[in-house]
């Protein structure tokens, strides 16, 4: 009947609701765990090879090699091949490092005092001053210095044991300004047999002021003594697009978040991902510093990736990790442990997976493990179970009522029975008298007839009719039973 599937569906829904954990949601408390495995340390250095042609006295070639730090900050891996987004100011500088190298080599070789910066200076000695100015770029036919500048970018992933050497990356696309996103790609290896963990990118930035977020990054090279730093922040009101960014602001006015985050940006969190508190996806990057930190949105990040020809995507490591993470944060430790083990098989250095696996194994089968059916009673303040039971009961009653109404609607309508068809007109019994010829046949076994009475008969005689009235005649009739006319004539 039609009501049975509906009742079964209501019962199934009720059981499913009762089976749900009371306080289950996608990634409670560990909202940053989806992103932190993909957070890396970025360090950029300008490598300068410079040759000073000293011909004040005897001609001499003085060769030096210098490494000038360009920037350091945090980046985020956005696809398994190792594509990384960070800020342009982390990997590129507006200073002319060739000028800085000229000041340094001149001060060292001629033993004069010149500030060690990227500014052009003058000397009291006219001859040395002329040679110094000829050492500055751009290169001319009378130049006293030959300079070759290259940028070296090193990525230090969040792995254990720590990768002290890191791996090199190229600057694929720089932004139009220092606070615009820059896109990097590894030049050689990417840690892991199937690539690297990635961070999911959000579709947009939350519009509501005061929306909670988290900022995650590194204040130094990842290692036993330098773990990822996570700070809570809130989105402020308004804010422009692009490099102008969106401010931060604590709605409770307890913490000056721009100052707090600005100090962290100066110490290494510049370019760090800003993580939404709703689903743990990246909604932007930390910019600024000093006393005014802001955030550029995810649309600027995706626009930079599009210009660089790189598509953000998730990989096999992320699928395994997210599945295990969901089980872990809903207290299904027995089921979470194999998932984290699988992640470590794909990416052996995953620090977050290793730590969560350790906790899962310690709690597996215990009173806190929801997968064993021996979960401890909810702690004080936890979401009670009765609202879910009440909701399930209401849904069950609603489903039953709907099924009954549907059955009533589809039940066949009783119609008045039709009168039986009129009885066939009964013909009067045949008269076997003289008025009608009737053929009467009997069947008797041949053996039952005495031999002297056995007569061989011919087959079925042909049918005859009265020549006067047309009435059918039997084979033994001599006269027509209807009109009396002799049958032989």
Image (cartoon, rainbow, N blue to C red):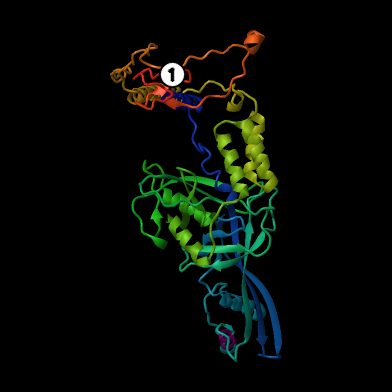
Location of mark 1 (residue): 478
Q: Residue at x 68, y 76 (%)?
A: 64
Q: Magenta-highlighted stretch: main secondary structure? A: helix
Left or right for 280, reference 45: left
Magenta part of the chain:
128-134
Q: Where 348 sits versus 434, above or below?
A: below
User: Badge 1 local density, few (<14 within 10 Å), some, or many (20+)?
Assistant: some
Quadrant for the N terminus in the image: top left
- What percent of the width, then of the height, locates residue 401? 36, 22
Q: Nearer the viewer, residue 484 or 187?
A: 484
Quadrant for residue 390, please give it: top left
Whether residue 113 is visible here, answered yes or no, is no
The image position of residue 393, as x and y in percent, is 41, 21
Residue 47, x across and y down, in percent: 64, 71
Q: Give residue 72's position: percent from left, percent from top.
A: 57, 60
Q: Is residue 33 left or right of residue 390?
A: right
Q: Magenta includes 130?
A: yes
């Amino acid at each position: 009947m039609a009501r049975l599937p509906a009742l079964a569906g209501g019962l199934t829904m009720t059981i499913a609701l009762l089976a749900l954990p009371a306080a289950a949601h996608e990634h409670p408390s560990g909202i940053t765990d989806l992103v932190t495995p993909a957070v890396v340390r970025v360090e950029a250095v300008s490598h300068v090879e410079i040759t000073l042609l000293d011909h004040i006295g005897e001609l001499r070639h003085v060769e030096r090699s210098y490494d000038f730090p360009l920037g350091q900050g945090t980046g985020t891996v956005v696809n398994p091949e190792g594509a990384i987004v960070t800020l342009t100011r982390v990997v590129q500088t507006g200073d002319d490092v060739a000028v800085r190298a000229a000041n340094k080599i001149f001060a060292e070789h001629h033993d004069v005092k010149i500030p060690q910066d990227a500014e052009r200076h003058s000397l009291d000695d006219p001859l040395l001053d002329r040679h110094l100015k000829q050492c500055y770029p751009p290169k001319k036919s009378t130049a006293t210095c030959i300079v070759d500048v290259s940028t070296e970018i090193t990525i230090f992933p969040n792995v254990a044991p720590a990768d002290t050497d890191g791996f090199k990356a190229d600057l694929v696309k720089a932004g139009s300004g220092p606070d615009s996103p820059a896109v990097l790609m590894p030049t050689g290896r990417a840690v892991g047999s199937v690539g690297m963990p990635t961070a999911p990118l959000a579709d947009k930035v939350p519009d509501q002021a005061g929306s909670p977020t988290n900022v995650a990054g590194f204040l130094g090279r990842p290692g036993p003594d330098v773990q990822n730093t996570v700070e809570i922040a809130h989105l402020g009101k308004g804010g422009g697009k692009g490099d102008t960014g969106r401010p931060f602001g604590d709605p409770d006015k307890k913490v000056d978040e721009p100052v707090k985050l600005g100090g962290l940006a100066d110490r290494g969190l510049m370019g760090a991902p800003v993580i939404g508190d709703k689903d743990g996806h990246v909604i932007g990057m930390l910019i600024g510093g000093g006393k005014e930190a802001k955030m550029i949105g995810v649309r600027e990040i995706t626009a930079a990736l599009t210009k660089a020809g790189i598509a953000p995507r998730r990989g096999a490591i992320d699928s395994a990790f997210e599945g295990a993470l969901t089980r872990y944060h809903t207290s299904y430790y027995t089921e979470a442990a194999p998932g984290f083990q699988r992640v470590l098989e794909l990416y052996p250095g995953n620090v977050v997976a290793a730590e969560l696996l350790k906790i899962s194994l310690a709690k597996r089968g215990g009173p806190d493990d929801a997968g064993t059916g021996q979960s401890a009673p909810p702690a004080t303040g936890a979401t009670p179970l009765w609202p879910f039971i009440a909701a399930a009961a209401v849904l069950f009653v609603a489903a039953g009522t709907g099924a009954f109404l549907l059955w009533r609607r589809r039940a066949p309508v009783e119609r008045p029975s039709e009168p039986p068809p009129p009885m066939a007109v009964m013909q009067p019994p045949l008269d076997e008298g003289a008025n009608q010829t009737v053929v009467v046949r009997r069947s008797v076994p041949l053996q039952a007839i005495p031999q002297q009475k056995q007569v061989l008969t011919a087959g079925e005689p042909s049918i005859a009719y009265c020549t006067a009235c047309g009435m059918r005649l039997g084979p033994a009739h001599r006269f027509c039973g209807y009109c009396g006319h002799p049958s032989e004539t």
